[in-house]
Structures are given as structure tokens and as C-alpha cells.
Image (tube, grey):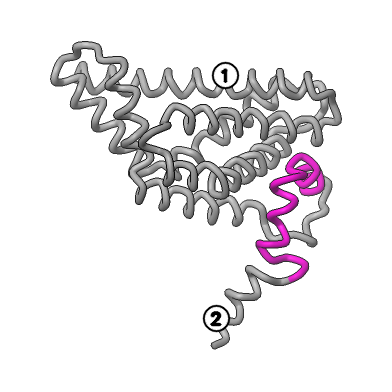
Amino acid sequence: THIFHEVVHVFTHADKGIFSLVPAVLFQPGTLALGYVQGKRKRYFSVFQYLIIIVGIVTFIMSKIHFMENMMDTFSTENEVPVSPKVLAVQNQLIGWMKQYMNLFLFALIPVFTLFSWLLFRKKGYNYAEHFVLQVVIQAQVNTITLLLTMPLAVLFGDSMPKLIFLLAFVILITSHTISNRQFFKISLLHAAGKGFLIYGCTLIVQMLIVMAIMMYFISS
């Protein structure tokens, strides 16, 4: 009974419950991150714990609705290029790892997002750890919107509109970076959008290079 009470308390407590954090994550991510780096943390449930919970839920749902499989099948069938059996085996193995460890893969990308955020906004005077907090909040917002919007659409229309779902996920990510950068750094909307796109683009390039390096290693071994 005591354990059940504590679980309910974590989710519903007026000051520090998860549900009291969600509106700030959705509508004031940059302000929330700025409050964290300024030491204003007592009011909210830990955003780091929240990210772990929300990513776990999203990953679980994506595995159950075969989200990754549907996306991969769509793009592979439309871009069929003859490949050797070994290359195909390595590709399938990498896809399997990504599906199995998707949550860890996302967490591993946060330091990369942070690096480019720190480089592109270095004149603002925030250190790497403070940029890390911002990127954690951004990922918390992205995954919350994914849970509330993208996942239901994927369940209902994923098989018929996979490209639209993929495009929606991209728009959510860029929008989240834009809003968060604007609120955190107190800059114009255009400036926030441009830097957000660059941060995402640079991180995507690093991600692709790592995947290519892993593929080349296994293909050549």
C-alpha cells in the first residue's frame, strides 16, 4: 500500500509530479531548461527522470506497432539498389540493433546534439553541461509530442502514410529546437530556427558517418 501511494504521489503531486511537468515540457521547453541551469528545480519533477520514462514508453509502443520495420520497408522498396548478400546481412543486423536498443541510441545522440549546440551558441556564454540540460529538455518535448501525436497517427495510418509520419517527426524535431532555442537564448525566431536546423543537420551527418564506419568494418571483416 505504501509503495502504491508513493507511485501515485510521483505522478500526481501538485508541485513535483510528472503531470505538473508536462505543460512546461510541451509549451515552455527553453524556459524550463533555463530555470534548471539557474537552479530553479524544486518546483518540477526531474526532467532527466522524465526523459527516461517517456523514451521507454515511446520505444515500447514503437516496437509493438513495428514502426521501424514499416519505415525501413517503405524506403527500401522505393530505393532498391542491388547489393551483395554480405552488405544486406550487415544492413539487417544494424537495423535489428537500432530496433532493439533504440532508447540507448537516442540517449547516445544527446551529447552530440549538445556539442553542436555549444559550438553554434558559444558566444552566449553557457557551458557544455548547461547546453546538455537544454538538449535533454528538447528530447523530452520531442518524445512527448511523439507519444501524443505521432504514435496515434502511426497506429491509425502508418501503413498507408509512412512518408507523412516520417515528415511529421522531422517537423516536430526542428520545431522543438526552434522554440527551445528562442526561449533559452532569447533570440529571434529565424535565428533560433536556423541554428536548430544546423544542429540537427550536423548531428545527422555524424550519425550517418558512424553507421557507415560500422558497416564498412563488418563488411571488410
In the image, what residue occupies the spot 68% across and 54% down?
Answer: 22
Task: Classify residue 3 by image quadrant.
Answer: bottom right
33 magenta-colored: yes
Measured as percent of width and height from the top left, residue 96 is found at 28, 37
Q: Is residue 2 shown in magenta?
A: no
Q: Nearer the viewer, residue 174 or 93?
A: 174
Q: Amino acid at mark 2?
A: Phe
Q: Is residue 214 left or right of residue 53?
A: left
Residue topped by disc 1: 202
Q: Which quadrant is home to the N terminus? A: bottom right
Q: Residue 194's spot in the image, x, y percent? A: 71, 18
Q: Residues within 10 Å of mark 1 (few under 14, many from 20)?
A: some
Residue interval drawn in magenta: 14-37
Tell me if residue 192 comes above or below residue 143 in the rendering: above
Point out which mark residue 4 bears: 2
- Judged from the image, the secondary structure of the residue bearing numbered disc 2 is helix
